[in-house]
Image (cartoon, rainbow, N blue to C red):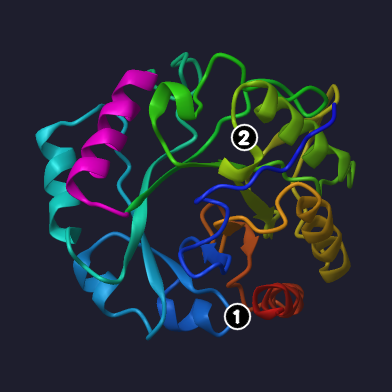
Amino acid sequence: MMLICSQSALSASGNGKTLHYTSGGPGAAIASAGFDLADVQSVEQLNALPPGMKGLIWLNESSGVTPRFIAKVKPFIGNPRLFGFRLCDEPDITGKYHSPAVSPAALKAEAEWIRANVPGAVTFVTLMDMGSFEAPAFMNTFNPANTGIDLFGLDPYPVRGKAFDLDFIDRTVEAAVAAGIPLDRIVPVYQAFGGGNWKTRTGAAADVYVLPTPDQAKQIFARWATYSPAPVFDFAYAWGSQNGDIKLGSASPEALELRLAFKAHNTAP
């Protein structure tokens, strides 16, 4: 499949600079690794970010414009540190993997409410791959047309116990474009974790994720750059450990080396 990179107002942040986001880390710590877009949940956290850093608000809302949704969004209206809202993580249109099922209409109502009431704020979700390692699939799930959401994160994690397959990125991007997500609406999600209790499958075999080496991370950056040379932001998943895993913010020698690779990426001209 030939993918043509288009340009739009969403092809980079307002000043033409790609922002760098990671989840689960405090502002000062992630700033030391060159990140300038933080994962926050409260106005207090947003206001406490280091100078020059913006906040992407984690809402965890996928049921439409409920009173709870409005109550979560309203405190951020007019805050100059606000970048946008991460509505939810990997919504499941079927309800088979994450219950309850999420409808495109509910997400569209949320995106439209934010657009009308918080001008300039970006809306974002990460997508669930409904296919497999060999054949990713996003068809008939969520895209800009049926949700009104600005940006969509894709998270093909290629470093595993049984494989290091950069072509997984290619397969995932091609599947997303086929499902109606333009290249300039895609947020690259980089693997920055390994080990712990996360499980996956590679082919027919059970498998585990492995923390990328610095060289593998550089290869991941380079492969993603062939599709998204200037995204609005990119996403290192993740800074903080969630399931006994080693992540970017860990104190291990391997994590410290990986942080240096991310810092070089984040601070490159």
Residue 130, position in %: x, y? 62, 21
Residue 41, position in %: x, y? 29, 59
Q: Secondary structure at mark 1?
A: loop
Q: Is residue 213 one of those drawn in magenta?
A: no
* Label 2 crowd bin: few (<14), some (14–19), many (20+), radius 10 Å: many
The picture quadrant where one finds residue 104 is top left
- Camera-nearest residue between 178 and 218: 178
Residue 69, position in %: x, y? 18, 40
Numbered badge on residue 182: 2
Amino acid carrying mark 2 in the image: Pro
Residue 237 visible (yes or no): no
Q: Residue at x 81, y 50 (%)?
A: 226
Amino acid carrying mark 1 in the image: Ala
Foreground label between 2 and 1: 2
Side (left or right) of 16 relative to 119: right
Quadrant housing the C terminus: bottom right
Q: Residue at x 78, y 34 (%)?
A: 3
The picture quadrant where one finds residue 79 is bottom left
* Label 1 crowd bin: few (<14), some (14–19), many (20+), radius 10 Å: many
**Span highlighted in magenta in the image:** 102-120
Q: Is residue 139 above or below residue 28?
A: above
Q: Secondary structure at mark 2?
A: loop
